Image (spheres, coloured by chain):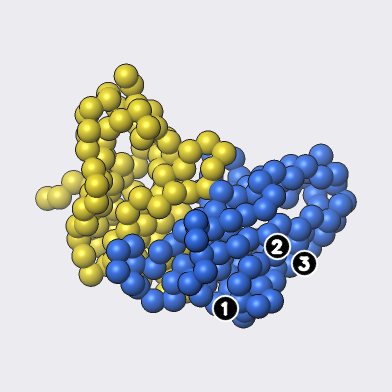
Amino acid sequence: DTGVSQDPRHKITKRGQNVTFRCDPISEHNRLYWYRQTLGQGPEFLTYFQNEAQLEKSRLLSDRFSAERPKGSFSTLEIQRTEQGDSAMYLCASSRLNPSGGSNYGYTFGSGTRLTVV
Amino acid sequence: GESVGLHLPTLSVQEGDNSIINCAYSNSASDYFIWYKQESGKGPQFIIDIRSNMDKRQGQRVTVLLNKTVKHLSLQIAATQPGDSAVYFCAERGNDYKLSFGAGTTVTVRA
């Protein structure tokens, strides 16, 4: 297991199109998170899953956004009818439920998907 | 009295010197803190973490200090190297399990 994987790394889409991103977390991590990062800012929380259950959604997550984690493993984030304001880096992270050894909860981020809406 | 380090958006440091990056956090109920390093075009990379029942934790060339009285976190990097140039973020975990990130500090290492 080499960490959190995200696909694609880059996505350019026309305004109004739908896009879907995928995240594969670290296999033993129960929790999976989606964050959004715009230029010059820190990541902002969007939503998180514990196993397959989506437990919290930020107010940033409008009705055009939907996330799933159907089998408690990988997750997808879909944006419908994209707008230019959706342009950002979308980051996925995973962590353990409880602290364990070395780096406590093991909060690990993927490399992100950079979305550009033109 | 104890001085609280200011958060600076940028830090320029001579190669080989020690770096100190400061961060103020907002939630007194936060129980866990992490420092991340982020290079251009990449996701945040875990550096070191600390739980709220500790005030100091050391890693390889890095030390995190936590002062809960003034809600302040710092990251010390010993013998700063060119590869340490990046944006550094502190993050706190509240009782709702998500991370809240502070304003980043851009560190530039001068050769």
Amino acid beneath label 2: Leu
Amino acid beneath label 1: Asn
Q: Numbered disc 3: what chain?
A: A
Task: Return the disc, 1 or 2, that comes first in the chain's sequence.
Answer: 1
Amino acid beneath label 3: Asp
The alpha-carbon separation of the residues under discs 1 and 2 comes to 16 Å
Q: Is residue A19 left or right of residue A90?
A: right
Q: Is residue B8 left or right of residue A86?
A: left
The answer to whether residue A34 of the structure is visible from this angle is no
- Label 2 belongs to which residue? A77
Name the residue located 37 percent from the left edge and 32 percent from the top edge: B83
Residue B14 point in image, percent of width and height: 27, 24
The mark closer to the camera, 3 or 2, is 2
Is A60 above or below relative to B6?
A: below
Which chain is blue in the picture? A
- Label 3 belongs to which residue? A63
Task: Return the disc, 1 or 3, that comes first in the chain's sequence.
Answer: 1
Name the residue located 41 percent from the left edge and 44 percent from the top edge: B37
Report helix, strand or loop for mark 3: loop
- Label 1 belongs to which residue? A51
The alpha-carbon separation of the residues under discs 1 and 3 comes to 22 Å
